[in-house]
Amino acid sequence: MPLKTHRDEETSINLTPMIDIVFLLIIFFMVGSRFSDMNQTERDISLRVPQVQSAQALTHSPGKRIINVYSDGNITLDQKQVTLPELENDLATAREQYQKIGVVVRGDRESLFDRVAQVIATCERVKIRDLNIAVSSESITR
């Protein structure tokens, strides 16, 4: 029986996992060193931040306010029944809190146009610039 004196395959070391780990370590230390520089810079500033009584968290812009004008003349703002002066006050307060507030006016098709026009005029008095009027895209069958 002949003995093999040479190997058919040479053993090799797979360096791919080691290279991956080295690259991950390089990225980790680059990112970590940047964060530590920022924290050190922030610690070096010798000032005291003022305190306020009514600090509020920053929030996303509010959604559009919905005004419904029903056929009997009732007006609702976000499902709360209001009169025209109450509507004006509520919209003015909302505009003070967020300048670019949007409003959608939805009038019943049987309602008087005069009431819808009063609501639109109220929105213009409060200086609401993002004013939309909701309509249906269905074909009218009469």
Image (spheres, rainbow, N blue to C red):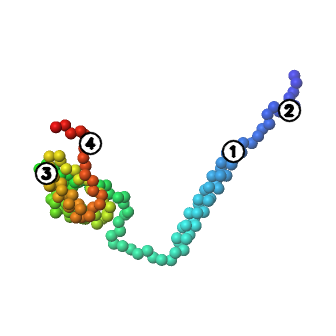
Bin the neighbour count of mark 2 within 10 Å (Cα to Cα): few under 14, some 14-19, many 20 and up.
few
* Amino acid on which the number 3 mark rests in the picture: Leu
The quadrant in which the C terminus is found is top left
Residue at x-position 62% and y-position 55%: 27
Bin the neighbour count of mark 4 within 10 Å (Cα to Cα): few under 14, some 14-19, many 20 and up.
few
Q: Where, by quadrant of the figure, is residue 5 drawn? A: top right
The reply to whether callout 4 and callout 2 are in contact (CB within 8 Å) is no
3D distance between C-alphas at marks 4 and 1: 61 Å
SS of the residue under disc 2: loop
The reply to whether callout 4 and callout 3 are in contact (CB within 8 Å) is no
Horizontal relation, residue 54 to residue 42: left or right: left
Q: Earlier in the sequence, mark 2 or mark 3?
A: 2
Q: Tell which of 125 and 96 is nearer to you.
A: 125
* Amino acid on which the number 2 mark rests in the picture: His
Bin the neighbour count of mark 3 within 10 Å (Cα to Cα): few under 14, some 14-19, many 20 and up.
some
Position of 2 relative to 99 (above/below)? above
SS of the residue under disc 1: helix
* Amino acid on which the number 1 mark rests in the picture: Thr
Mark 4, residue position: 137
Residue 76 in the image: state x and y as whole percent.
Answer: 19, 54
3D distance between C-alphas at marks 3 and 1: 77 Å
Mark 3, residue position: 112
Mark 1, residue position: 16
Mark 2, residue position: 6
3D distance between C-alphas at marks 2 and 3: 101 Å
